[in-house]
Image (cartoon, grey):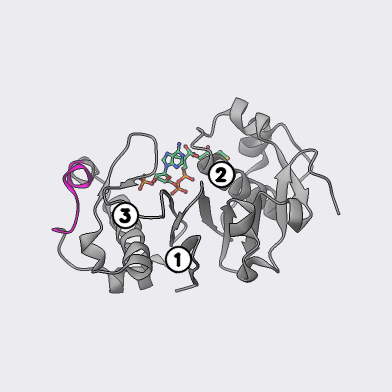
Amino acid sequence: MLIDLAEPQFALRLARISDAMADMPTGQNWLSPSEQTRLQAMRHSGRREEFLLGRWLLRTLFARSFGGDPATWPFAEQPQRPPVSVRHSPFGYVSISHGGGFVAAAAAVSPIGVDVESATRRLPAEVFEPLFGRSGMTDLERLQHWVVTEAFLKQQILPAHTDTIRRNALQPAPVNRARVRVQLTDDYIFAIAGAPDVLSAASFAAWPGYGPVGSGQS
Ligand SMILES: CC(C)(COP(=O)(O)OP(=O)(O)OC[C@H]1O[C@@H](n2cnc3c(N)ncnc32)[C@H](O)[C@@H]1OP(=O)(O)O)[C@@H](O)C(=O)NCCC(=O)NCCS
């Protein structure tokens, strides 16, 4: 596990897909009916793998925080939204991300959003600039900005459209005013958007913060 946190107000796991595969049951009888239906419509094996890993990782978070076997924590699919826990628990909000060989799952008592990408992913300026309306950034700055914005939009269940991206423009912010915290490693870039009590967790202390434009630079 690259990140593995269990706090009273949230839980979070980030893993390499190859490592997460080893911990997942081989059968699929733990999937809920709506998950089975969605999986059956997926043709690409890599996409199916990501889908399964995200759902399993999520179940492991709930089992660890509230007890029982991960398979006893069913989730229902929601179109264009993250899955929702069928069982009642203090964690009413979840977020999943898969990309670049990594998978992340988070659950919290308040809205939460996570996003992960491979640190080697190249995001061309021709793709980034029309969407974000910003230019003059390095490859790494563009990728970081993208991941941070995805986490922020996912926390609010917003689509990644040009208008929502621009309305929710972010800039580096002091940690006490950050709405998103980001971790940069040689392998991956990971961002988490959450309430202040989630983002003030000790594990995020060294991670740079981002906030809405106007939240001020330190
Ligand atoms: C779907 C989207 C929410 C995230 O897509 P993504 O970053 O490519 O994919 P991720 O793996 O990080 O996240 C996908 C997961 O987010 C969840 N999700 C889907 N729609 C969501 C929404 N509106 N809000 C929050 N979470 C959502 C789902 O659980 C999904 O996983 P699943 O398909 O296995 O069910 C959306 O942001 C999108 O369409 N992105 C496309 C990329 C883009 O144009 N980004 C612009 C830069 S910000």
Instruction: Give residue 54's position: percent from left, percent from top.
Output: 35, 56
Residue type highlighted by circle 2: Glu
Question: Farthest right residue?
Answer: 218
**Magenta part of the chain:** 29-37
Looking at the picture, how far across and down is residue 96, in whole percent?
42, 52
Camera-nearest label, 3 or 1: 1
Judging depth in this view, the residue of 109 and 204 nearest the camera is 109
**Mark 3 Cβ inside 8 Å of ligand 1:** no
Q: Is residue 88 magenta?
A: no
Q: Earlier in the sequence, mark 1 or mark 2?
A: 1
Question: Distance between the Cα atoms at labels 1 and 2?
Answer: 18 Å
Tell me the quadrant of the picture where the C terminus can be found: bottom right
Residue in view at x 21 percent, y 61 percent:
72
Circle 1 Cα neighbour tier, 10 Å, few/some/many (<14 / 14–19 / ≥20): many
Mark 2 C-beta to ligand 1 under 8 Å: yes
Q: Which residue is mark 1?
A: 13
Q: Which residue is mark 3?
A: 46
Residue 16 in picture, x, y percent from top left: 43, 68
Quadrant for the N terminus, please. Answer: bottom left
152 or 45: nearer the viewer: 152
Residue that mark 2 sits on: 150
Amino acid under label 3? Answer: Gly
Q: Between marks 3 and 1, how big is the CA–CA gap?
A: 20 Å
**Which residue, as the protein is rendered here, is positioned at the far top?**
163
